[in-house]
């Protein structure tokens, strides 16, 4: 019901909607859903039905080249990687399963693409065409300002980055440690911008 979504976004005074694409997480979740139609079709309908910015993200596996190519051709506000290497929600759901199911399905929970692999895929897509999406959010396995600087500068599409787990770790220690961490990350980014040049791959 698209109207319910519009009402929810309005009540929250949100700027738009982020759609999480999580087929593997749902499959491994004991009470999870099985997707009956391709997520790309639902995303297209959401864009048509909702007069608001829409971002699409994964939840810990990242996306392959065909998925990225399809998403980058849509009028999305951004695509977020949520790549392999960060928090893996498929693995988290598998922890809730019985031991035999965990043992048998554990290998598939590690299938995915890293943030660097996805930057390379996006660059290849950008080289071969003119993607509609103009903004990326590089996340998943991004550990610090140096990773952020490297990946953002490698991307041929404008990108910001996020590394949530490190922020959460310092937030759990308290407000002051979090502020100190943020300030050091900000300083590190300024230092990298002043002294480092990212090489293009050979």
Image (spheres, rainbow, N blue to C red):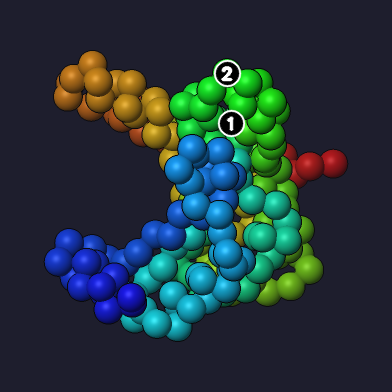
In the displayed structure, would residue 136 be above or below residue 166?
Answer: below
Tell me what residue is drawn at x 76 percent, y 58 percent: 124
Q: Position of residue 180 (x, y in %)?
A: 26, 22
Between the C-alphas of marks 2 and 1, the distance is: 24 Å
The reply to whether callout 2 and callout 1 are in contact (CB within 8 Å) is no
Mark yes or no: residue 141 visible. no
User: Going by the image, does 26 lie left or right of 12?
Assistant: right
Q: Quadrant of the C terminus?
A: top right
Q: Quadrant of the N terminus?
A: bottom left
Residue 113 numbered tag = none
In which quadrant of the rendered view does residue 105 lie?
top right
Whether residue 48 is visible to the viewer of this picture, yes or no, is yes
> What residue lies at 17% left-to-right and 24% top-to-bottom?
175
Residue 181 in the image, given as x and y percentages of width and height = 31, 23
Helix, strand, or loop for circle 1?
loop
Residue labelled with disc 1? 85
Relative to 173, does residue 81 appear above or below in the rendering? below
- Residue highlighted by disc 2: 99
């Amino acid at each position: 019901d698209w109207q319910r979504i519009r009402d929810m976004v309005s009540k929250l005074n949100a700027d738009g909607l982020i759609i999480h694409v999580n087929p593997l997480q749902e499959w491994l979740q004991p009470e999870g859903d099985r997707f009956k139609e391709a997520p790309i079709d639902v995303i297209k309908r959401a864009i048509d039905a909702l007069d608001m910015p829409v971002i699409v993200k994964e939840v810990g596996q990242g996306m392959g080249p065909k998925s990225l190519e399809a998403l980058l051709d849509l009028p999305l506000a951004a695509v977020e990687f949520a790549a392999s290497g960060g928090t893996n929600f498929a693995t988290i759901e598998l922890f809730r399963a019985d031991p035999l199911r965990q043992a048998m399905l554990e290998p598939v929970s590690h299938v995915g693409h890293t943030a660097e692999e996805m930057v390379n895929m996006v660059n290849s897509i950008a080289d071969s065409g003119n993607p509609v999406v103009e903004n990326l959010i590089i996340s998943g396995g991004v550990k610090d300002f140096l990773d952020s600087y490297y990946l953002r500068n490698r991307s041929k599409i404008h990108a910001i980055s996020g590394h949530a787990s490190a922020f959460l770790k310092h937030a759990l220690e308290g407000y002051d440690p979090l502020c100190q961490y943020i300030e050091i990350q900000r300083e590190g980014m300024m230092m990298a911008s002043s002294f480092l040049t990212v090489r293009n791959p050979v």
